[in-house]
Amino acid sequence: MSADVVHESNHRRTFAIISHPDAGKTTLTEKFLLYSGAVQEAGAVHAREGRRSSRSDWMEIEQQRGISISSTVLQFPYHGHTINLLDTPGHRDFSEDTYRVLAAVDAVVMVLDAAKGIESQTLKLFQVCRSRNLPVLTFLNKYDRPGREPLELLDEIESQINLRPTPVTWPVGSGDEFRGVVDRRTGQYTKFTRTARGASAALEEDIDLHEAAKEGGRAWQHAMDELGLLEAVGADVDLPSFLAGESTPVFIGSALTNFGVRKLLDAVVELAPAPAPRTTVGGTPQPLENAFSAFVFKVQANMDPSHRDRIAFARICSGTFERGMSVTNARTGRDMTTKYATTAFGADRETVDLAYPGDVVGLVNASGVLIGDTLYGAGYEGAAVEYPQLPRFAPEVFARARPMDNGKAKQFRKGLEQLDEEGVVQVLRDPDMGDTENVLAAVGQLQFEVFAHRLGSEFGAPTEIVSAPYQAIRLTDKQSSERLRQIGGIRILTRGDGALVALFENKYRLQRLMSDEPELTLEPILASGEAH
């Protein structure tokens, strides 16, 4: 059995795609599905029966706004491997969701708009990848449009993220003059061809470099000069430094027209690492062949609106998952069954009977399971397995939520609880005042808009969001909270996980208090984008 686990995990690739909004992340995700055969037409996910179903952006509000606001899990086969692709929100306001996804993957594809490069809104996310030493593949997208010089983009990657770029493919021309790419490993030249609306796989015509050189021209000579420079500085793919999160192989293409997508997907299989032992809270790597263990990195409600369900997504770290097996939640010590387990394909699902390290399994209506929980199966002889908690981001904006219809109070409370568990926002409560006296805490304002939209559309509780006058938040304890309650401009509330927090109407009062009364417990929450 242990040999099967290692063999199966060696054929898993689990990675996330991250980018700035509008860089082409969701388009690239859909083109991966096209090239894998998981869909027959870009923009549509086809179930096995062939019916048209959902895209990776499956929420109604995502389709209305044209942005990704929730991470999505997609599993599909490719070249004898099982690919677990996690599409992430691009907007900074949802960077906490992306951070949790990054904890569940073994590699990352970073998508950059060739005209814009690294944009400040998502710089922190890229820096998180670097701080976690995650292997990063870089895709310079939209090369068929006017863009910046490729050498300039390489310098930006190195200076801003401290990743040494090692180009695998290199462009000949750009924008209207884009003619194709040279594969530096094989010496082959691939001509750029467009496909109708990018709906089908691109015809890729590979030509020997010497034969292609006959076309000549200024763009060709310019590309040859740049390739000579890259050769001189030794900017070649180096597998050890890539796996250590120190260098990044770079690919050129156009996701919209499908050009360069196949080479990038092939590189995920060839270069990205298979699942490796994960380190537990005690600092011990958990061997892949040990009994089943996993951790929950995402909770999502109402993916199937007709059933009003709740799914906990768990990344398997060791052993074999078998549907129906009994597992223990390390946080609560309680056992639970896994009768309703699915693989995910956007909003589509399919029952899963077996899964292995690297796979992501959706546990349907797993009551009491929260983000960050460790689940483990029999075989540990009473010894609990526990993986490190996923840290929360420091909220930067605060608001209050009030039901617009008091007759919908029950639905409002249910939605509040569910969306808090999902991590859409943090709901802070005063146990003595009830749910209508809550304070919402978030990284950005867009989270509040999504929160209100989902309360109305999914829970039938139209909600008013009103700004709250707080400027800072700190974790505290019972003893310190008694003193803090005596001071004006400070409110003590309870977070969903039971932690006490102090909200300050004036951040300068916080600084003064920390200076005057250093014995008080006032711990900062993890800052946005900061690695744990």
Image (cartoon, rainbow, N blue to C red):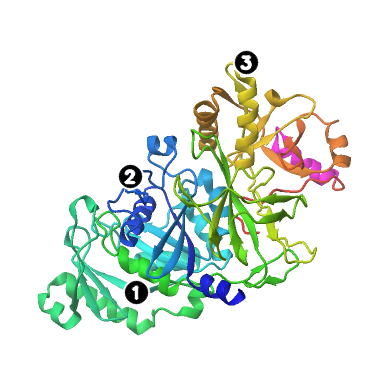
Q: Quadrant of residue 426?
A: top right
- Residue 453 in picture, x, y percent from top left: 50, 30
Main SS, magenta residues: helix
What type is the residue that disc 1 sits on? Val
Q: Is residue 417 magenta?
A: no
- Residue 59 in picture, x, y percent from top left: 44, 39
> Distance from label 2 to label 1 (Cα)?
37 Å
- On screen, residue 166 versus residue 442, left or right, reads left
Residue 522 shows up from this direction: yes
Binning the other alpha carbons within 10 Å of mark 2 as few (below 14), some (14 to 19) or many (20 upward) gives: few
Q: Is residue 505 magenta?
A: yes
Q: Quadrant of the N terminus?
A: bottom right
> On screen, 451 above or below 378?
above
Select label 2 or label 3 by which is in front. Answer: 2
| Mark drawn on residue 406 | 3
Q: Which residue is mark 2?
A: 51
Which of the two discs, 2 and 1, labels the residue nearer the N terminus?
Answer: 2
